[in-house]
Amino acid sequence: MTSADHVLSCSWSIKATLPSRLVAAVFALIYGTALASLPILLFQDRENYLVYADESLAILLRYAERGVLPLITNEPVWLLINSALGAVLVPADVLRVLIFVSATIVAYRVLRADARNAFWLLLFLLLPQIVKNHIVHLRQGVAIAVFLLGWFSRRKTWWIAALAVTPLIHASFFFILLLVAISALSRWSRLGPDVRLSAFASLGLGLGWSLGVIASILGARQAEVYSFTAADVSGLGFLFWASILVLMIMQGKSFLRQHTLEVAIICFYLSTYFLVEVAARIFESGLILVLLACLHLTSWRKWTALGGIAGFGVIQWVPRFAQPVWGF
């Protein structure tokens, strides 16, 4: 190929990617605007978020007085973001900015993940577990947005920095980063899939039994919010995601190696499902990666997984339509 041909080829490649980027950006802006435009006080926990928007600096200073560990484990970057926005905006507008920015970033990164599966990417964004992070769990939504910015970055320094800051926005990412590290270590050491699955499940069981004690020792606010006891759950989520894990295992060793983190996230969730009530919150921080991994399944496994996800979403949405503000 001549230099001229190479330039033409690059130019065509750039032009070919522009429409998908533009479409993704437009849909992401619509998604973020729609969620940010919903009434501020209509949904759960909004009063607490208004307090954060107004008093974050004072809260941050209180944690700092208790020591370094309580400061680190109580999401100081989240408090700093709120403090900075609260210095120039009224509390209600702080919430709208947080919702708009985080939801737009998440939507854009998801829609850019695999243009060939645009329908499924849009469906993922409409799942209750995804929408909830920009309606109810705003702090978690911001952390997920930062995580995805780093995860899909080609710059190693930005990848490291973005991931490192996420647990300082939402504490669930302490566990996600632990799984990232262990997943990388297991790939480096070339452990077999069965050993990896056992290791991830063992980690979940160990942390599930001791999470309350750990939170109390570190001075995390969650020690006062959660009981860290067996969750009151139906078991439906366990059965569904266990079936997704089975499909991933059936895909073979190559898939399991390429998607070690996603498999680890599911294993950790399943092993803590009946032990602590925060299992779902931790799982939701890595859910988008799990959903995207399902797109890389092949043949009947892919369609079984995606059909199951769509059906599971419908099952979750239908009862919500009869509830005020969709149960949020």
Image: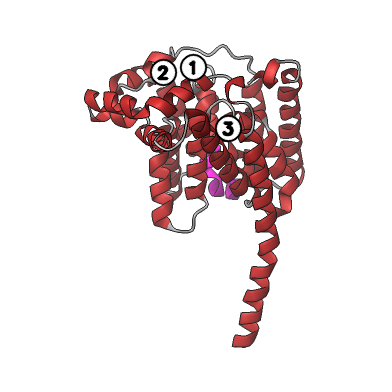
CB within 8 Å, label 2 to label 3? no
How far apart, in angstroms, are the residues tagged by discs 2 and 1? 7 Å
Sequence-wise first label, 2 or 3: 3
Sequence-wise first label, 2 or 1: 2
Residue for badge 2: 209
Tell me the quarter of the image containing the N terminus: bottom right
Secondary structure of the residue carrying tag 2 is: helix
Residue for badge 3: 134
CB within 8 Å, label 2 to label 1? yes
Mark number, residue 182 = none
Query: Callout 2, which amino acid?
Result: Trp
Sequence-wise first label, 3 or 1: 3
- Could you say where residue 284 lies in the image, as x and y percent from the top left? 55, 31
How far apart, in angstroms, are the residues tagged by discs 3 and 1? 26 Å
Residue for badge 1: 275
Which stretch appears magenta?
251-263
- Could you say where residue 30 lies in the image, as x and y percent from the top left? 68, 43
- Could you say where residue 140 lies in the image, as x and y percent from the top left? 50, 32
Q: Residues within 10 Å of mark 3 (few under 14, many from 20)?
A: many
Query: Callout 1, which amino acid?
Result: Leu
Tell me: 175 left or right of 194: left
How far apart, in angstroms, are the residues tagged by discs 2 and 3? 30 Å
